[in-house]
């Protein structure tokens, strides 16, 4: 019976470890998704500003026109960089979500394994016959 208790204790420990891995993967997936969302919003805002400055026609002289053109160009470059970073963050978030799915399957498998082991141990102990009682007393036949 001590072997069964040890196996069950090990199964419970494995399930706890899988639960901790699952929580860690969920936290990482959440952080990656938050970064992705912020970078996509930044990319969109920068692209919108770049378009607004490109359409703006309030230049009074060549220096104003050149300054607005440079600002629009810089905003466009920043928007392109932000879009690349957002794409990288999207891939990272997808990877973290895949890791979360793997951790979820591992946790599910560990829980199923522990329950199956507990059930098997319970059935085995129920099937065991009680030890035969010794005959005692002075009655001889």
Image (cartoon, rainbow, N blue to C red):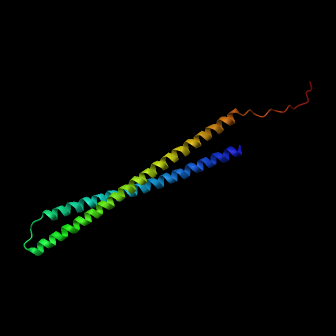
Drawn side of residue 84 relative to residue 135, left or right: left
Residue 27 quadrant: bottom left
> Residue at image x 63%, y 48%?
9
Left or right: 97 as drawn, with respect to 39: right
Q: Nearer the viewer, residue 22 or 127?
A: 22
Q: Position of residue 35 (x, y in %)?
A: 35, 59
Task: Farthest residue to the left: give it.
Answer: 60
Q: Residue at x 28, y 58 (%)?
A: 41
Image location (x, y in percent) of residue 59: 9, 70
Left or right of residue 131: residue 12: left
Q: Residue at x 61, y 37 (%)?
A: 119
Query: Hey, which residue is sitting farthest bottom in the picture?
Result: 63
Counting the numbered discs, the total is: 0
Quarter occupied by residue 65: bottom left
User: 26 and 141: which one is in front?
Assistant: 26
In the foreground, 52 or 14:
52
Residue 126 lies, in percent from the top left, at 68, 34
Q: Nearer the viewer, residue 117 or 103?
A: 103
Can you say which quadrant of the picture contains the C terminus? Answer: top right
Question: Which quadrant holds residue 78?
Answer: bottom left
Image position, residue 91 (x, y; %): 38, 55
Quarter containing the N terminus: top right
57 relative to 88 in the view: left or right: left
Residue farthest to the top?
141
């Amino acid at each position: 019976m001590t072997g069964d208790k040890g196996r069950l204790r090990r199964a419970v420990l494995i399930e706890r470890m899988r639960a901790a891995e699952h929580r860690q993967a969920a936290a990482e997936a959440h952080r990656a998704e938050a970064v992705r969302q912020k970078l996509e919003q930044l990319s969109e805002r920068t692209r919108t500003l770049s378009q607004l400055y490109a359409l703006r026609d309030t230049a009074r002289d060549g220096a104003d026109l050149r300054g607005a053109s440079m600002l629009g160009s810089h905003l466009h470059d920043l928007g392109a960089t932000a879009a690349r970073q957002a794409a990288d963050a999207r891939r990272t978030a997808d990877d973290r979500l895949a890791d979360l799915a793997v951790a979820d399957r591992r946790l599910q498998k560990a829980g199923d394994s522990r329950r199956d082991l507990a059930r098997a141990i319970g059935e085995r102990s129920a099937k065991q016959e009680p030890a035969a009682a010794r005959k005692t007393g002075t009655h001889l036949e």
